[in-house]
Image: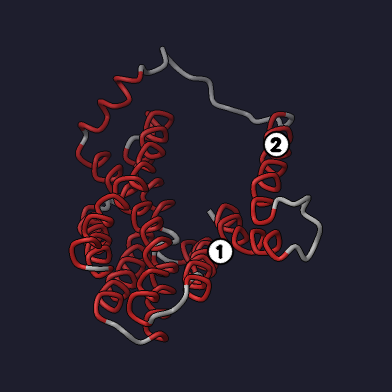
Amino acid sequence: QFVKAIASFLAPYIAMWGATQSIPTFGMGWRVLFPVYMLVAVAAILWLGTTSIHEEREEGRPSTFGECLALLGKPFILLCFVGIMCHVGIDVGTNTTAPKILMERLGMTLADAGFATSLYFIFRTAGCFLGAFILQKMASRTFFAISVLCMLAAMAGLFVSHDRTMIYVCIALVGFGNSNIFPIVFSQALLALPQKKNEVSGLMIMGLFGGTVFPLAMGVASDAMGQSGAVAVMTVGVVYLFFYMTKMRH
């Protein structure tokens, strides 16, 4: 998760490097981001392809797609699936909403308000890195509770605040709080059904489509009541994660 967060953190800076053309970018401008990530992705695929990975032998026949989806009938797996949806929804939602809040309430330009997205990823990246060490010393349920409380406090602040510093603090809290939700929920699901870890893993990754559901709802809400409406939709996701915490088994 930490390594993955680095890509999101660096994206605006690579795009800025291309847009300012401080180094020749073959006329692509900010779109230089795409060939840079393409080359990194191709290199990673080739490297992974030559890496020897020992895998456990599958016993019995592989599960069908329908049998994988049927696991959602197990209450805790369904809770984890929706938890992943909420995590991704909050992640994507903060990226799109944070600059709009600054523009709506403080009259900032898009260029200046764009720093909010970078700030979010700075704290999300730091949170992923620190989480690897914190979770060695602290129970996952305790750290999950701290993370959710950080986001609840942030949502309350984003809902009412018109102060730039306060809004930045809230964005930072969301970044830190949301940074370790995915690995904790993912591991909880695997621990719940270790004999079906491949199927459960696939289901949890499907939960990433929460990143399409939340922005749609946030767009409708923001049209009705401004960016506070978008924050209200994200708050629903945070409240669900608080409920999920009460059902955690480990």
Residue 221 in percent (x, y) is at 21, 59
121 or 162: nearer the viewer: 162
**Amino acid at dot 1:** Phe
Contact between marks 1 and 2 (CB within 8 A): the answer is no
Taking the spot 36% from the left edge, 50% from the top edge, the residue there is: 185
| Residue at the limit of the structure toward the right, as seen here | 24
Residue 229 in percent (x, y) is at 22, 65
Residue 220 in percent (x, y) is at 22, 55
Residue 99 in percent (x, y) is at 42, 69
**Residue 112 as seen in the image, left or right of residue 185:** right
Residue hosting label 2: 42
Q: Is residue 86 above or below residue 52?
A: below
Q: Secondary structure at mark 1?
A: helix
Say which of marks 1 and 2 sits in front: 2
Q: CA distance from mark 1 to mark 2?
A: 25 Å
Q: How many marks?
A: 2
234 or 151: nearer the viewer: 234
Taking the spot 29% from the left edge, 51% from the top edge, the residue there is: 214
| Residue at the limit of the structure toward the front, as seen here | 27
Q: Is residue 36 above or below residue 167?
A: above
Taking the spot 27% from the left edge, 39% from the top edge, the residue there is: 77
Taking the spot 27% from the left edge, 45% from the top edge, the residue there is: 82
**Amino acid at dot 2:** Val
Residue hosting label 1: 129
Would you call the spot at circle 1 few (<14 residues within 10 Å), some (14-19), or many (20 or more)?
some
Quadrant assignment, res 52: top right
Q: Secondary structure at mark 2?
A: helix
- The tag earlier along the polypeptide, 1 or 2, is 2
Would you call the spot at circle 2 few (<14 residues within 10 Å), some (14-19), or many (20 or more)?
few
54 or 209: nearer the viewer: 209
